[in-house]
Image (cartoon, rainbow, N blue to C red):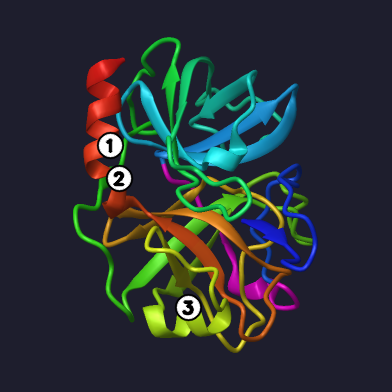
Amino acid sequence: LLTLTLTTQMSLGTNGLLVQITGLTGLSKQCFYPWQVYFTYYGQGWCGGSLITSQWIISAAHCYQPNLVTHLGEHDVTKEEGTEHHIQVEKICKHSSYGPLSFNNTFMLVKLAQPAQLNQYVQPIRLAQDCPTAGTQCLVSGWGNLLTDDGKHPMCLDLPFLSDQSCKASYPLQITSSMFCAGFLEGGKDLCQGDSGGPLVCNGELYGVVSWGRECAQKGYPGVYIKVCNYISWVQNVMNTY
């Protein structure tokens, strides 16, 4: 999750991808999901993504860099385990209405230079056709820099989808129709500092893209995500074109 202080300049700051449970690390858990993508930029962890076909990935537009490398089937990022695919990127398509200052429509598609070999470690995830409803239980995942794990393995957090009313109350005049909130208004549990572009999954389908938030696990400030359901037609058009 890209974390930022909204009173200062918005910047990427996604080096060091992590899922962090502030002060409550025991509530996180190691996990492995075959659609999870790990992007590096000049060898450094940069952002997350979700494999949706053998050759296309969804991520966040503010993760864009010209020389991204895609890592699929990744678990321990400090060593080769025989499950990984490291594939160069052929093309990146940012949404034409992406607003880099507001993060509105921070949505992009990444085409791999060659199709991934699908197996038990590398599998695409279905796109949600409908938008989630308040109270739906979801799961967000990414590589962490937790004190207990040092960022080697992907970590997961179960969290609820929040109502539009709660989301807009937390971030007045900042939530657009492309965004929703998920997490805990009481604070203490959240994503933190990284893994922008990663997946938020509900009922086995991709509902959200990790986008932004205010600081980390602060009371009253849940994580903000991009609604996948808003981009189904755009995704199909881009994949059909390229």
Name the secondary structure under disc 3.
Answer: helix
Give the camera-side residue of 24 and 187: 187
- Tell me: 59 left or right of 120: right
The residue carrying mark 1 is: 234
The residue carrying mark 2 is: 231
Q: Is residue 140 above or below residue 106?
A: below
The answer to whether residue 20 is seen in the rendering is yes
Q: Amino acid under label 3?
A: Cys
Mark 3 and mark 1 in contact? Answer it, CB < 8 Å.
no
Whether residue 106 appears in magenta in the rendering, the answer is no
Q: Amino acid under label 2?
A: Tyr
Image: magenta residue range: 22-33
In the image as oriented, which residue stretches furthest toward the bottom?
Answer: 186
Q: Residue 147 location, x and y as percent?
A: 80, 61
The residue positioned 75% from the left and 53% from the top of the image is 145
Q: Residues within 10 Å of mark 1 (few under 14, many from 20)?
A: few
Q: Residue 38 location, x and y as percent?
A: 57, 35
The answer to whether residue 78 is seen in the rendering is no
Mark 1 and mark 2 in contact? Answer it, CB < 8 Å.
yes
The residue carrying mark 3 is: 167
Q: Residues within 10 Å of mark 2 (few under 14, many from 20)?
A: some
In the rendered image, the quadrant that contains the N terminus is: bottom right
